[in-house]
Image: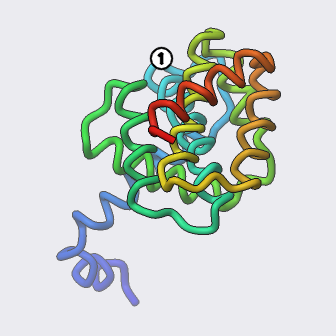
Amino acid sequence: MARSTLSRIFHPFSFGRHMFQTLKELFDSFTAPFSPEASPAERAHSVQLAAAVLLVEVVRADAAMDAAERDAMVRALRERFTLTDDEIERLVELAVDTAKTAYDYQRFTGNLNDHFTQPQKIELVEAMWQVAYADARLDENEMHAISKVAGLLHVTHGEYIAAKMRAKEAASL
């Protein structure tokens, strides 16, 4: 087909195509390794995606994402990052897609180790526990995922247990 024919065919869908391109650019900026010339916004997006993927991993450990876990994940992201509802929805979608192809936690935890303070790392571990407790069932795979991430974030065992207890208390379990 000639280019002009394709343009006419896809013209009515240019918004959708533009949106797809924007999402692809957003994904690329989140997953690209940091470069010295990365903008502060690109670095912030990468950190946000890393945190979101780790929250998604807790949900993935439990076989299915139910509404309570999703709500806990969105709430955690909203509390930690200044994002609009639309941005949070896109971040969650991107995190779910990214988590499906992630083969380890290292690239995400490495990013967070470079950019989070120790209290922020502990808050993330606590948020992971909040997601795990959201469905009122604590699965062994969820515990393992959180424990592994906490270790990679250099969260001490005491900090890890305190975060777990705060999340458990908040969940009224």
107 vs 63, left or right, is right
The percent coordinates of residue 15 (x first, y second) are 22, 63
Q: Nearer the viewer, residue 158 or 57?
A: 158
Q: Which residue is mark 1?
A: 40
Count of labels shown? 1
Task: Give the left or right position of residue 38, taking residue 87 as reference.
Answer: right
For badge 1, the amino acid type reads Pro
**Residue depicted at x 59% and y 45%:** 53
How is this picture coloured? rainbow
Q: Position of residue 17 (x, y in %)?
A: 32, 66
Which one is in front, 99 or 155?
155
Give the quadrant of residue 21.
bottom left
Going 55% across and 21% down the picture, which residue do you hit? Answer: 123
- The one nearer the camera, 171 or 96, is 171
> Is the residue 166 above or below the residue 24 in the image?
above
Q: Residue furthest front?
A: 173
Q: Is residue 98 visible?
A: no
**Does residue 21 lie above or below 47 as drawn?**
below
Q: Quadrant of residue 49?
A: top right
Secondary structure of the residue carrying tag 1 is helix
Q: Residues within 10 Å of mark 1 (few under 14, many from 20)?
A: few
Farthest residue, direction bottom: 1
Q: Residue at x 68, y 32 (%)?
A: 33
Give the image location of residue 60, x and y in percent. Answer: 63, 59
Q: Is residue 64 visible to us here?
A: yes
Q: For this rendering, which residue is in front, 1 or 13?
A: 13
* Residue 30: percent from left, percent from top: 55, 39
Q: Quadrant of the N terminus?
A: bottom left
